[in-house]
Each structure stands twice: as structure tokens, then as C-alpha cells.
Image (tube, rainbow, N blue to C red):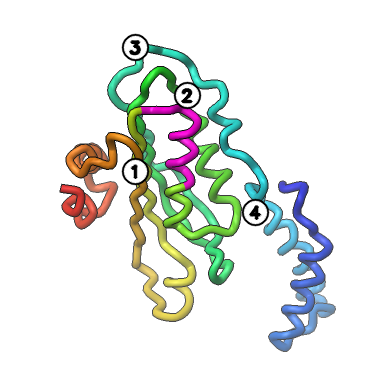
Amino acid sequence: MAATVDRERIAAAVRELLRAIGSDPDSAELASTPFRVADAYAEFFAGVGQDPAVFLSDAVPVGDDTGELVLLRDITLSSMCEHHLLPFRGRAHIAYRPDARVVGLSALPRVVETLAARPQVQERLGEQIADALQDGLSPHGVLVILEASHGCVADRGVRQSGALTVTVASRGVFSDPAEQAALFALLGDGVSREHRDAAR
């Protein structure tokens, strides 16, 4: 859990929030809630102040043996939207075309988890993941596709529980629509047809 999170302040804020909605934070049912929320927030926001580059620091030089493409799909994604502090959840697909170095595959989900564990918007999250990989590995190209459902869309306002948001962030050779289309074809039905067609 994040050492920088001030649990006492969070608990005090939750107690005030409970009062503000007309509940009694000292009732038997709610007495422990502020501290449970504080512990949960320490998990949700553990990435605040953390540098995802540390997970890319042990990249392996491979030169001509690099291969053409590294693609890791269906990485579990969970974050908190900064607009309403409601969760958004889904999956990330990450591809990069290596130059001289590759990194252990477990590093990619760790980059996603670190950047997701802070107040976020999906559009910026994808760009940050792409930047981290571009800066950390200097590949020929990076493509990050995020698919997520958002609590602020599903649970309030328009209440569209089936809506899915897809965002794309590209760097280098994968900024080319033809290159993107080839990757979307590899992902198949894992990414909406609308976004595959848009890349053509």
C-alpha cells in the first residue's frame, strides 16, 4: 500500500462525507467505514509519485535477434476516474517494435498498474503508458490500446452500463494507420471493429 497516503486524513474526510449525506458515522454500521475507505484508497492510489520507468530499467540488449513485434494483450486494467473518483475497469493491449532492447514481459503490466493507480482519465493513461515505453526502451514504435467501462457512465448520469470506451496511443512506426490496422487484425475481436476500421 502507498506509504504517502495519509489514512487519518482520509478517514476524517469520509466521516465528514457521511455526515454530509445525512448518515451517522458513529453508528455501529458505519463506525469502521472511514478506516476501510482509507485502506482502500491506499491501494487505489498506490501509483501516486511512483516512476514506472523502474520496471523498464533491466531491458535486455538483443540486437539483430530482437524480432519484429512484441504484443501483450488482455492486461487487466483498473483505475479511478479523476472526475468523480469512480472506478473504470477493462484491459490494455500493448505492442512495441523493438530496436536494440526488449524487457521482461511482466514489466508491461507493472507499468500499466503503476500509472493506473492514481487519479486518471483513460485518454491520458494510454498516452503515459506509450511515453513510458518509448522513453524506457527506445523502440521503433509503440501502440497502446485501452478498453474500459467507466463507473461515471454506468452508475450515474446516462447510466449506460454496457458502454465501452476504446482509446489508442501510438508512437513511432505505429502512428502509421496501415501499421495500426495490422495490429488490430492481430487482436481480432478483442478490439471493436469500429476502431479497426478507423485505422485503415
Disc 3 to disc 4, how far (Cα)? 38 Å
Residue behind mark 3: 65
Q: In this figure, which residue is indicated by the disc labeled 1?
A: 170
The amino acid type of the residue labelled 3 equals Asp
Q: N-terminal of the two: label 4 or label 1?
A: 4
Residue at x-position 41% and y-position 62%: 149
Q: Earlier in the sequence, mark 1 or mark 3?
A: 3
Q: Which class describes the residues within 10 Å of circle 1: few (<14), some (14-19), or many (20+)? A: many
Q: Residue 7: horizontal and vertical position, in percent? A: 79, 59
Could you tell which of marks 3 and 2 lies nearer the N-terminus? 3
Say few, some or many: other residues with alpha carbon within 10 Å of mark 4 (under 14 / 14 to 19 / 20 or more).
many
Graded by Cα atoms within 10 Å as few (under 14), some (14 to 19) or many (20 or more), the crowding at tag 3 reads few
Q: Secondary structure at mark 1?
A: strand
Residue closer to the observer: 117 or 75: 117
Query: Is residue 132 shown in magenta?
Result: yes
Nearer-N-terminus badge (2/4) = 4
Residue holding disc 4: 45
Q: Residue furthest bottom?
A: 22
> In the visual, does 102 lie left or right of 78?
left
Q: Position of residue 121 (x, y in %)?
A: 49, 60
Decide which of tag 3 and tag 4 comes sooner along the chain. Answer: 4
